[in-house]
Image: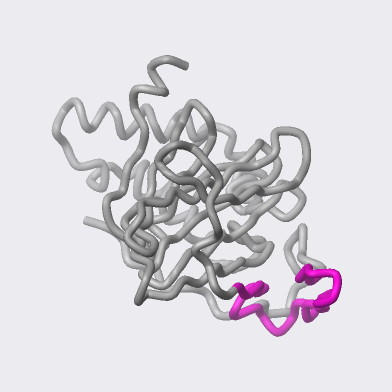
Amino acid sequence: MNRAADNPIVLNRPGPRLVDSALTGNGKLGVMVRTRPDGLCISFGHVDAWDIRHAVMRESDGDNQHTFQWVYSFLHRHMNKGTNPWTEPEWQHYTGKLHTVYSKPYPCPFPCGTLFLGTDRRVTEVLGWTILIDQGEIRVRMNHAGQPVQVRIFCDSEQDRCWVDARDDHEQIVASPFIRLYLSPDVEPPPALPAPEEENDHQGRYLAFSQRLPYEEPPDGIEVCKPTPYIPVP
């Protein structure tokens, strides 16, 4: 734990792309945070609606060898040798088979919707984020009205809840730097999926939606959506 506390993950700029996301969770609920110049995008996933494609690949042909541990060991061995893993037929076979399953869009990572928290760029600047590994907490650094603000994002350890608050440098809670919010399901859901149903209650001050997501592959002949293109990395 002490070693984790000494090694936070830091991004010193806005990270609007998927690869720039900060991640946290509690083992059931997963949270992905992207920082944009105009606010935060917080996407959610859950083990009840998770990405099963890797497991499907292993079950499809009885492949129990290519576990994540095998991947780590394989790449670590090539890193020590300074060689290119893409020259290995076994690696080419593994990645090709992986693509066959991962070209299917659902179930996909973080399919449970996205919460957007918007700021006023005239008074609020998003500076970057820090993941405190020992605490499972994301801290988004901002400059709001000339004052430093840290937005804390963390998951309840027992329940499916994600908490967000804003604090100053003295860890005191301050007024929210956000001026608008928007809750969205997947922005491009395949047409075969049931449409989300809104459950908003503006007087009760909550926004919600429900949507039934698949947990297994659709029947033959039903195209969920077109496969994504695959470009191998040399």
Residue 6 pos. (x, y %): 34, 22
Relative to residue 138, is residue 215 drawn left or right? right
Total numbered labels: 0
Residue 230 locus on image (x, y percent): 39, 68
> Which of the image's four quarters has the C terminus?
bottom left
- Magenta span has 207? yes
Residue at 39% x, 31% y is 72
Please state if 78 lies on the left or on the right of 71 as rendered: left
Please report the residue visible at 37 percent of the width from the left and 75 percent of the height from the top. 121
Q: In the rendered view, would you say 215 is above or below 69?
A: below
Question: In the depicted view, which residue is nearer to us: 116 or 22?
Answer: 116
Q: Quadrant of residue 85?
A: top left
Q: Is residue 63 visible?
A: yes
Residue 61 image position (x, y, % from top left): 62, 46
Q: Residue furthest bottom?
A: 191
Which one is in front, 144 or 231?
Answer: 144
Q: Main secondary structure of the magenta part?
A: loop
Left or right for 205, reference 26: right
Residue at the image point whose x is 36% and y is 33% from the top: 8
Query: Looking at the picture, how far across and down is residue 205, in whole percent?
Result: 79, 69
Q: Nearer the viewer, residue 162 or 191?
A: 162
76 with respect to 132 (left or right): left
Span colored in magenta: 181-210
The residue under the point 76% across, 34% down is 158
* Residue 211 visible to the viewer: no
Q: Residue furthest top?
A: 2
